[in-house]
Image (spheres, grey):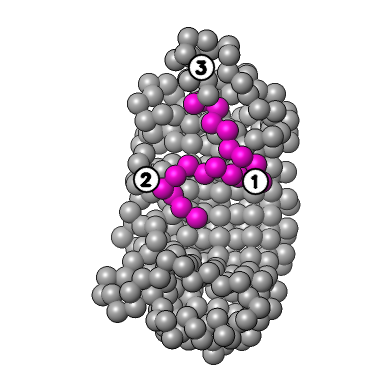
Amino acid sequence: MTVNHHIEQFHGLPVFDFVQALDEAADAGDAAAVTLPEPAAAAWRIGLHYDSEEAFTERWRQFLDTVDTERVTAVVIGPWFSDEPEELDAALAAIVEAAGRLPALRGLFVGDVTYEESEISWLEMCDVTPLLTAYPELTELVVRGGNDLKLTPVRHEALRALRFEAGGLPAAVVRAVAGCDFPTLERLELWLGVDNYGGDATLNDLAPFLDGTRFPAVRHLGLQNSEFEDAIAAAVAHAPVVARLESLSLAMGVLTDQGATALLEGQPLTHLRALDLHHHFLTGEVQQRLTEALPGVEIDLSEAGKPDDRWRYVAVAE
């Protein structure tokens, strides 16, 4: 998972940049010559270029008026390049108001912004609760950016995958996720980030995800990109939820031998299909112990940092 490039696949579909396609045709002097994919054959990306003078709502309206949106199943919202709350609220309101024109929408990615366009720590967000209430058939939601991000606990019958990507995920959002009622949720990923950028969640805030009382359908849990990944690993080692997981991610954070050893000494993990620990600070000895202890598990130990590095860091922060 990277924030260095725009996503190329989402919800099982290739991403098609609607705005870029129209602009390229206009630059060529033939705005009517643009070739669009079938509505259900792509995840439609709608966003602004960095130097755009248009409002996001104008581009969104153009998308609604050009594409047969009743057949669109996935949408990727790119950058809106504004730190004005009213403009962000207007963008969100436009997406919410279009729910009746997007009856087949099942996948929504909000904030497909790269480092070149905006540091993730600067990326402004808003209250995303209305997206869940407006789209009751949504099965996948991804939100990137933590600044001013808000969520109110809500019940959603259809959601199966939820991911929050942030360099600092507010504790209030983590607690709100824990307070939601998602009976069909199978995949949950939280990029917790660092305190300097608003990632103020604690281990106590993660307890509802670990004790098995929330989200009975969850089969993949990602508590990642954290400064206290060792403490998370130690808690996971005895967490009731692990027994029903098929895959687990403690990746992208400051995981050291201490946390990995706690995993090895805790409950069995041999039932897992995959264990993602990429971007870590483990010694070669402990990496080998993990591999030998879990021979049937696909373990990602890539992006190894120096175990003795004084300046250990998470994968995504600023």
Observer-nearest of 121 and 253: 253
Q: Amino acid at mark 3?
A: Ala
First reached walking from the N terminus: tag 1 or tag 3: 1
Q: Amino acid at mark 2?
A: Tyr
Mark 3–mark 2 Cα distance, whole angstroms, equals: 27 Å
Image side of residue 106 versus residue 121, left or right = right
Pointer 3: residues within 10 angstroms few (<14), some, or many (20+)?
some
First reached walking from the N terminus: tag 3 or tag 2: 3
To which residue does mark 1 refer?
11
To which residue does mark 3 refer?
25
To which residue does mark 2 refer?
115
Q: Are marks 1 and 3 in contact (CB under 8 Å)?
A: no
Q: Residue at x 43, y 33 (%)?
A: 80
Q: Secondary structure at mark 2?
A: loop
Quarter assignment of residue 161? bottom right
Vertical order, 303 against 262 (above or below): above
Q: Residue at x 34, y 63 (%)?
A: 195
- Position in image of residue 312 (x %, y %): 32, 70
Q: Amino acid at mark 1?
A: His
Q: Which residues are magenta?
A: 1-20
First reached walking from the N terminus: tag 1 or tag 2: 1
Please indicate, yes or no, whether residue 100 appears anywhere in the rendered image.
no
Q: Nearer the viewer, mark 1 or mark 3?
A: 3
Vertical order, 44 against 184 (above or below): above
Please indicate, yes or no, whether residue 183 appears anywhere in the rendered image.
yes
Observer-nearest of 32 and 162: 32
Q: Are marks 1 and 2 in contact (CB under 8 Å)?
A: no
Image side of residue 130 versus residue 49, left or right = right
Q: Nearer the viewer, mark 3 or mark 2?
A: 3
